[in-house]
Amino acid sequence: MLTFIFRRLGTMVLTMLCLTLVVFFLINLDPNLKKLAISQTEMHTSAEQLEQWLVTHGYRENFFVRYGQWLGVIKKQPIINPQTGEATQRFPFCDDPTEPVYSGVLEGDFGCSTKFRTAVAKKLFPALGATGILMFWVLVVMIPVSLLIGILAGMREGSRTDRTLSVASIASTATPEYVSGVIFTVIFATWLGWLNGSAASTRNGITLYNFTLPVITLAIYGIGYIARMTRASMVEVMTQQYIRTARLKGLSFRSVVIKHALRNALIAPFTVIMLQFPWLLTGVVVVEIMFRYQGFGYTLVEAASNNDIDLLLSCSLVSVFIVLITQLISDVGYAFLNPRIRVQ
Amino acid sequence: MQLEFISVFGIITGVIARFWPVWIALAVIMVPSYVYKKKLGLYGQLYDSGVGIAGLLICLFWLFTAIFASTISPFNPLQQLVVMKDALPGAIDPDTHKVFLFGGDKLARDVFSRMVYGSQIVLIIAPAATGFALMVGITLGLPAGYYGGRIDSVLSFLANLVLAFPVILLFYLLVTPGIMDTPIPYAMAGLFFLFPIIFFVVLFWTRFKNRPDRLYVLLAITLILGGWIYAGLVFDADPLGIVHIAPNQLNIFVAVVFASSPGVFRIVRGLVMDIKTRDYVAAAQTRGESPWYIMLWEILPNARGPLIVDTCLRIGYTTILLGTLGYFGLGLAPESPDWGTAIKDASRLLRAVIHPALPPTIALMSFVLGLNLLADSLREQSMKD
């Protein structure tokens, strides 16, 4: 088991290295650098000055040198004034060093956000915290509801409840966040006026009024999928011999479902729930933009549309990390929950 | 100026009347299919369940809407009639006396016509991109599952690499105006569009290599047709000028294929690993058939059930991806009538006007729902056998 986890962790590190390299390459394409230079200099700067800005800020150095600097295995250089030899910070707004040092991701320095004019860590971690709160409430809503729907539908396959709930869960998987968000806003905010169509006011405190819409919008897309997987798993368990034995022994249907079927039927949904995280990540971006909630998704979109190199790299690092760690947890957890695999 | 309106009943009958070519086409297709469903195999079995009929009905509805879009829509989707800005549903255009059935949007365009034309964009790109993703996934998934070992490790690592990317980040990196100045989208298109040609060449070669009369004809057709489409799509150099794709459309097309082919790869790989243990594969191996013959002519036909179901779901998922692209304003032109862009435009003004938001959302939702219902009923039917 331990060697398995270590091998997976090794693959994970390799994957993260490859992915950040790809992101680094795409972000540093020439048109993107030009866009960055234009946004970081004064209006009406000539082409030579833009090029000059890129050179002095180190954007024209060798690609691998710069990747190494970001990673922290090559020293970061300050700007050296060619006449006086005086060293100045590359970006004064986030404590860049004035002498060459190793200062990259491995040393815990995520770099400098050119869009928000602050250190990436100062911007990214509060945003992650905000998204964490959102995710927490989404999971609180999503998991019980979807498991309940799945169990009720899978308990008696082919019954009227099963058909109704199955069609409802298919409908919910067919509704992406930007669709359900619009529909919910129209119904609950514009027509009924019960809820707030914007979560911008959550900074002054989260209330049912301003936080319900983002949470249910994000939850609804996942509910259908998890419910369908739970149903499939439940249907399979209900046809097993031991369920029939328990029924023939004279136990009530209710106690067979709760004591015998549930425990075995919930192993598969655990994996599915863990693997939902990557999907939720895209949903988070849509929902945060739609409801103006300043979390991770909002930061990612701002970083991407302003070509904020360090911030976007950190965002991709975080999201890739989340995807890979949830995969690992789902594999390890599955082995733990399922005795047949654990013994092997 | 005061606009005149027609009643709610008038709007409903008006919409139903505008869709007349769709109703006729649906009747022509579905009534005979229902009558002869016993003789139509898997397709006929769809008519046995309510879910199947509903799924098929919705999918065909949007298919025919896309085909007859120019007949159905009363206005040009880009035409702006200034008086109709934010007009409510049922408003009558004072000049032409034609009705804005679903009202006008903030740029005074007809919401109904835009919804109808939006279906064209979605129904061209989504199935085509899914088709290419299928080709890429099958061509790479077959050897990965069949040979295992190093090929499998490398390909699976690459597939997991792409799957570990959050889709939205991938799109923000791959679908930008800047990237169209670089050769990257064209290189990726060149690579992806090669797969269907390789697939069909290998397919025919393995089957007919001892029958040159059939082989050369089929290979010639594949290479000429494939090369023609390839030249048109990748280099925009179709000598006849028929196959043409705008650079921004090529860009989103490539990004969508890139994002969804690893999923197909994983499914094909899993299916192949399961099927290669069957007796008929062992029989073919004993006969001395080549590995690619076994993969393409023994394993692939037997994996078709789950693959068809997955393709249905995947077209729906690709539609959602296209909507996401439109919602973030990536790739598609800002005035494009596709559903995602329309939702983006309308959702910013939801406090004031809601009617431009509802038609595209309901259209997108119903189309994906139709595909999911279809997939569900196909899965149920294929499990029965």
Image (cartoon, rainbow, N blue to C red):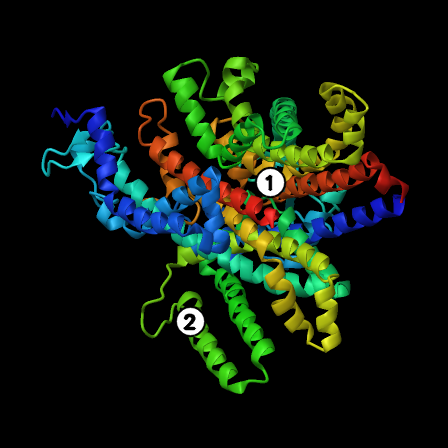
Which residue carries the number 2 mark? B231
Q: Position of residue B88 (x, y in %)?
A: 24, 27
The residue lying at 36 percent from left, 45 percent from top is B62
Near-viewer residue (A10 or B64): B64
Near-viewer residue (B179 or A324): A324
The residue lying at 65 percent from left, 72 percent from top is B292
Q: Position of residue B310 (x, y in %)?
A: 56, 50
The residue lying at 79 percent from left, 35 percent from top is A241
Badge 2, how many Cα within 10 Å: few under 14, some, many 20+? some
Q: CA distance from mark 1 to mark 2?
A: 39 Å
Q: Position of residue A273 (x, y in %)?
A: 67, 34
Q: Position of residue B211 (x, y in %)?
A: 55, 85
Figure check: B162 above or below A295: below
Asked which secondary structure carries label 2, the reply is helix
Near-viewer residue (B171 or B136): B136
Residue type of the residue flagged with mark 2? Ala
